[in-house]
Image (spheres, grey):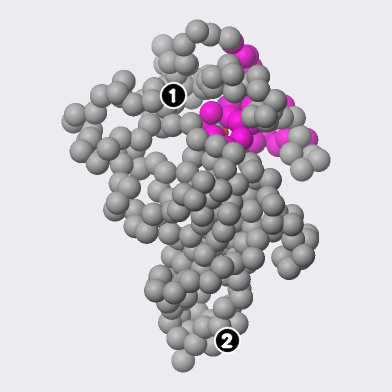
Amino acid sequence: MLNSQEENGGPYKASIPLDQATNPAADVLLAYEMNGEVLNRDHGYPLRVIVPGVIGARSVKWLDRIDIIEEESQGFFMQKDYKMFPPSVDWDNIDWSTRKPQMDFPVQCAICSLEDTNVLKKGEVIVAGYAVSGGGRGIERVDISVDGGKTWLEASRCQKSDVPYVSCDVTSDKWAWVFFKAVVDITEDSTIIAKAVDSSANVQPERVETIWNLRGILNTSWHRIRLQIAP
Ligand SMILES: Nc1nc2c(c(=O)[nH]1)N[C@H]1C(S)=C(S)[C@@H](COP(=O)(O)O)O[C@H]1N2
Ligand SMILES: [Mo]
């Protein structure tokens, strides 16, 4: 049957354990609004699932049906896509059944205020972005380096973008993005780095090479921005 499989645009499936779906502390939602507005089409109008702390692939959009089943979903994106394999596994020897579907996501952060192509004047530069961790592990800290990782300073953190960073309550919502910000002084071409630490003391890995996996998922290595300073 053409196009009936989910990887070809057929109905999308995912499952989570019943325990999690029904545990009030897991905060799993069926959402019809986002930020006080009706959910838009791309985010799943009229109704979608939100499974906080879990990779996006398990939060089914344009929800049609919920089944209570004995085994995890056998859908394509549960069984043959979002799984992490060790470095020795390639497309010739992969056995999808040997690994579980990815659920919680690891700690990560991204710098959003700067881009690689930026050419700036000498002086103060704002390094700001977001950090988040999975599994209900909040963000403990975001470290910033302006010398390629030799020395670090701690960014300030905030969860509501309209609250000034200085007065922000740092006991953060464990599911949501945490915004970070640091003001640094840049005098020469520099590599700016951000790395986050979560409440379980997990830290982002330095380089993608050390966490390479066949499917290319969960690349949470340090976010680096190369800045040029105008002569
Ligand atoms: N019905 C349906 N739901 C889906 C998907 C999809 O292709 N179809 N993609 C999933 C994946 S892989 C992700 S990352 C999230 C993205 O949600 P967003 O567009 O609101 O960020 O939706 C998930 N839910
Ligand atoms: Mo995704």
Q: Which residues are magenta?
A: 38-67
Q: Is residue 48 above or below residue 88?
A: above
Seen in the picture, residue 95 relative to 172 is either above or below; the reply is above
Rounded to the nearest angstrom, the CA distance separating label 2 from label 1 is: 48 Å
Magenta segment includes 13: no
Residue 108, percent across and down?
50, 51
Residue drawn at the location 38% of the way across and 25% of the way down: 100
The residue at the far left in this view is 92
Query: Which residue position is annotated with label 2?
Result: 123
Q: Which corner quadrant of the image does residue 74 belong to?
A: top left
Secondary structure at badge 1 equals helix
Q: Which mark is residue 20?
A: none
- Give x and y (percent) for residue 156: 64, 65
Which quadrant of the view contains residue 217?
top left
Nearer the observer, 144 or 202: 202
Residue lying farthest front? 200
Q: At label 2, which amino acid type do we have? A: Gly
Q: Residue at x 64, y 53 (%)?
A: 178
Label 2 neighbour load within 10 Å: few <14, some 14-19, many 20+ = few
Q: Main secondary structure of the magenta part?
A: loop
Read off the residue under disc 1. Answer: 78
Seen from the viewer's position, the closer of residues 90 and 51 is 51
Residue type at numbered disc 1: Met
> Visible in this render: residue 169?
yes
